[in-house]
């Protein structure tokens, strides 16, 4: 629906803002819950089972799809895709271990995973024969 209302440039900006704000919303919810005395287990259960708190993968997929059509020289993005994948592989265990200690780092799990899988999808979808996507 938004594609018809906004230009692609505006839609990408909106999605980048939403992707950036998603962890901030989870962090705010985490600290508000902590301030109100809600247990860590209940807080994380609400964050992991409520759609508004994990829109990162959906937004990452939308951004990947919007940029996918426009890339004229995809070979220069291959390194970026691999870096996204590698960063996710390195950061996910760290974030997960810190989450086990009831840290606010639990707010970044979906962001790290969505970045990692967006990089994986783009990198694996790459046409290595010299053509385009």
Image: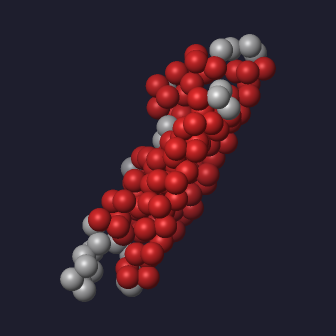
Q: Is residue 133 above or below residue 46?
A: below
Residue 6 image offset from top left, x and y in percent? 48, 60
Quadrant (top left, top right, bottom left, bottom right) of the C terminus: bottom left
Inspect this view and state whether residue 32 appears: yes
Q: Nearer the viewer, residue 47 or 62?
A: 47
Task: Identify which residue, 112 or 35, lies in the foreground.
Answer: 112
Which quadrant of the view contains residue 119? bottom left
Give coordinates of residue 110: x percent, y percent. 51, 42
In the image, taking residue 130 as reference, residue 80 lies left or right, namely: right
Of residue 133 and residue 16, the one placed in the foreground of this image is 133
Look at 62% across and 36% down and name the residue there: 98
Q: Residue at x 34, y 72 (%)?
A: 69
Q: Which residue is pictured at 42% across the width and 47% down the height?
A: 58
Query: Which residue is outermost to the right?
Result: 35
- What residue is rendered at 55% in x and 28% in y? 47
Q: How is the image coloured?
A: secondary structure
Hey, which residue is sitting farthest left in the picture? 129
User: How many tags in the picture?
Assistant: 0
Quarter of the view holding residue 41: top right
- Pinpoint residue 44: horizontal percent, then vertical percent: 57, 25
Q: How far across and how far down the image is residue 118, in percent?
A: 41, 57
């Amino acid at each position: 629906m938004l594609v018809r209302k906004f230009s692609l440039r505006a839609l990408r900006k909106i999605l980048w803002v939403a992707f950036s704000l998603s962890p901030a919303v989870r962090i705010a919810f985490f600290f508000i819950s902590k301030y109100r005395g809600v247990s860590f287990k209940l807080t994380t259960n609400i964050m992991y089972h409520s759609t508004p708190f994990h829109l990162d993968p959906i937004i990452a997929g939308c951004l990947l799809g919007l940029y996918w059509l426009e890339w004229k020289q995809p070979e220069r993005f291959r390194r970026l895709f691999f870096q996204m994948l590698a960063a996710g592989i390195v950061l996910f265990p760290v974030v997960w271990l810190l989450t086990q200690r009831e840290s606010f780092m639990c707010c970044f799990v979906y962001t790290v995973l969505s970045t990692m899988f967006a990089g994986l999808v783009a990198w694996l979808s790459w046409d290595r024969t010299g053509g385009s996507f």
